[in-house]
């Protein structure tokens, strides 16, 4: 066993990851697991379940931390703190591969040559920003196919939300000026943009171009409205994330506010999965490492709790971002007030979740009574089929549990066998056979949580007899 920095994976008898950890000295860390009497009960169970171990060395401990976070998100070991945030984030995209750039919402890989701004907490928040850019800077957001085939201005031009470059109502030079102003605004330089617009308005008025001056005045008013519309918009913050943690009843909620260019891009609640004994510092450190595994961190993270190994975490994030990342737990002032507001949101979100979970538990108990189950179901799977006049046949599965719908477990089955068009019985039989043939192959002893306690089929006695 090398004495180098690196990552280790504990595997069970089937080769599935039980735990992923990092260490400055792999040999010392692994040897510590052999002293079972000194380990807490959770780690004793983990060591008892471990059948093999794999290691991967790195050059530095910071690299090990980044690799650990990546493996935890990908392998989801049950003894690690898991992020459980499988939603992608929205970004604002300003294209750069055409004479008249387009502004639009974007999700997924960045394959197009463009400037990207974000992340935004929701599609709604990025949509609001797109509308603001259209209102102030008159940038087009129509698809390229529509742009190339317009013969007259659309409604957005009539209501002063677009400069109509599609039909030549603005020159490429003047449009580039609008684009540059929009980029400056998105970079947090809204004050400079407002001064520039004021100068343009004065020049237009001096030249007696009163209609143009009035149009610029309307843009200035729109910019002023945007600047004053954010709930959390501290003057001292340009690019930062505000991260607050609240724990209650053995569960955690992390609230994240995205501040970009001095504007609030929205917030999101995340509920990490962990054992009841995890300390706030451990949860905060695990969250930050995994959260920024697939997205660039801003220069400043404002935190409600000091994370475990804070200096190492800042070093790892800086290594990933290729610029300095600072972690700050403010104690007073404006930044403290922002973090306190986020912490309040985290507490309220966790309280709502606990109340919903309690209500869900009562509903599941009632379902168990209706179907005479020995205990409340922990996973319910519902199946249905669909086709279009006998073609394009599909079956679908929806899963739910004590915490609500399990969207990551949803499945869609394209019917592959040659069946009589519209034969709903045969379709249902194929779907169930494929679902549980794979389940038996992957987990024959039915010991994991992917096996349902109850199956619901949309149909009647015919569908039931077919399966």
Image (cartoon, rainbow, N blue to C red):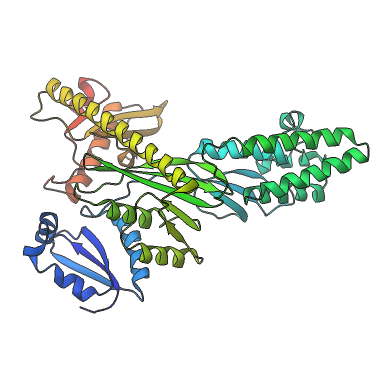
Task: Determine the image quadrant of residue 248.
Answer: top left
Q: Position of residue 44 (x, y in %)?
A: 10, 59
Q: Position of residue 421 (x, y in %)?
A: 36, 29
Residue nearer the viewer, 13 or 376 = 376
Report the front residue among 449 and 47.
47
Q: In the visual, does 299 lie left or right of 462?
A: right
Residue 274 placed where, x, y %?
Answer: 24, 48
Residue sitting farthest toward the right? 207
Q: Quadrant of the N terminus?
A: bottom left
At horizontal 67% and vertical 46% (from top left) the residue drawn is 190
* Quarter of the view holding residue 439: top left
Q: Answer yes or no: is residue 195 visible.
A: yes
Q: Is residue 467 visible?
A: no
Q: Is residue 342 left or right of residue 193?
A: left
Q: Residue furthest front?
A: 332
Q: Is residue 248 left or right of residue 87?
A: left
Residue name at image x 62 percent, y 54 percent: 114
Q: Quadrant of the C terminus?
A: top left
């Amino acid at each position: 066993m090398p004495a180098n920095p690196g990552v280790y994976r504990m595997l069970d008898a089937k080769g599935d990851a039980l735990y992923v950890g990092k260490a400055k000295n792999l040999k010392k860390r692994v040897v510590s697991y052999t002293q079972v009497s000194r380990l807490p009960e959770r780690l004793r169970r983990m060591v008892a379940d471990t059948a093999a171990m794999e290691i991967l060395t790195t050059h530095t401990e910071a690299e090990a931390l980044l690799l650990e976070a990546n493996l935890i998100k990908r392998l989801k070991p049950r003894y690690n703190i898991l992020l459980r945030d499988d939603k992608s984030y929205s970004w604002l995209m300003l294209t750069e591969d055409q004479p008249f750039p387009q502004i639009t919402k974007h999700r997924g890989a960045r394959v197009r040559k463009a400037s990207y701004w974000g992340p935004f907490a929701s599609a709604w928040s990025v949509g609001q920003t797109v509308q603001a850019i259209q209102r102030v800077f008159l940038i087009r957001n129509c698809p390229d196919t529509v742009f190339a085939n317009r013969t007259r201005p659309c409604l957005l031009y009539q209501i002063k939300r677009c400069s109509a470059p599609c039909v030549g109502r603005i020159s490429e030079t003047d449009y580039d000026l609008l684009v540059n102003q929009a980029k400056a605004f998105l970079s947090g330089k809204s004050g400079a943009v407002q001064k520039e617009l004021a100068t343009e308005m004065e020049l237009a008025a001096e030249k007696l171009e009163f209609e143009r001056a009035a149009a610029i005045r309307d843009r200035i008013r729109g910019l002023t409205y945007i600047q004053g519309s954010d709930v959390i918009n501290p003057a001292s913050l340009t690019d930062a994330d505000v991260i607050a943690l609240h724990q209650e009843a053995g569960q955690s909620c992390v609230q994240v506010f995205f501040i970009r260019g001095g504007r609030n891009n929205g917030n999101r609640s995340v509920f990490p999965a962990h054992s009841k004994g995890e300390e706030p510092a451990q949860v905060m450190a695990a969250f930050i490492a995994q959260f920024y595994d697939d997205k660039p961190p801003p220069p400043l993270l404002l935190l409600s709790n000091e994370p475990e190994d804070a200096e190492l975490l800042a070093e790892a994030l800086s290594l990933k971002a290729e610029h300095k990342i600072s972690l700050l737990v403010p104690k007073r002032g404006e930044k403290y007030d922002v973090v306190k507001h986020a912490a309040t949101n985290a507490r309220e979100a966790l309280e709502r979740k606990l109340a919903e979970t309690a209500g869900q538990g009562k509903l599941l108990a009632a379902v168990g009574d209706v179907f005479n189950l020995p205990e409340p179901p922990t996973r319910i799977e519902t199946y249905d089929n669909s086709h279009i006049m006998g073609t394009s046949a599909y079956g679908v599965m929806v899963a739910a549990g004590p915490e609500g719908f399990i969207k990551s477990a949803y499945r869609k089955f394209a019917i592959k066998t040659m069946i009589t068009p519209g034969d709903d019985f045969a379709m249902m039989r194929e779907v169930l056979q494929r679902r549980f043939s794979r389940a038996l192959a992957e987990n024959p002893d039915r010991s994991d949580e992917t096996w349902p306690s109850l199956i619901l089929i949309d149909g009647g006695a015919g569908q039931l007899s077919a399966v």
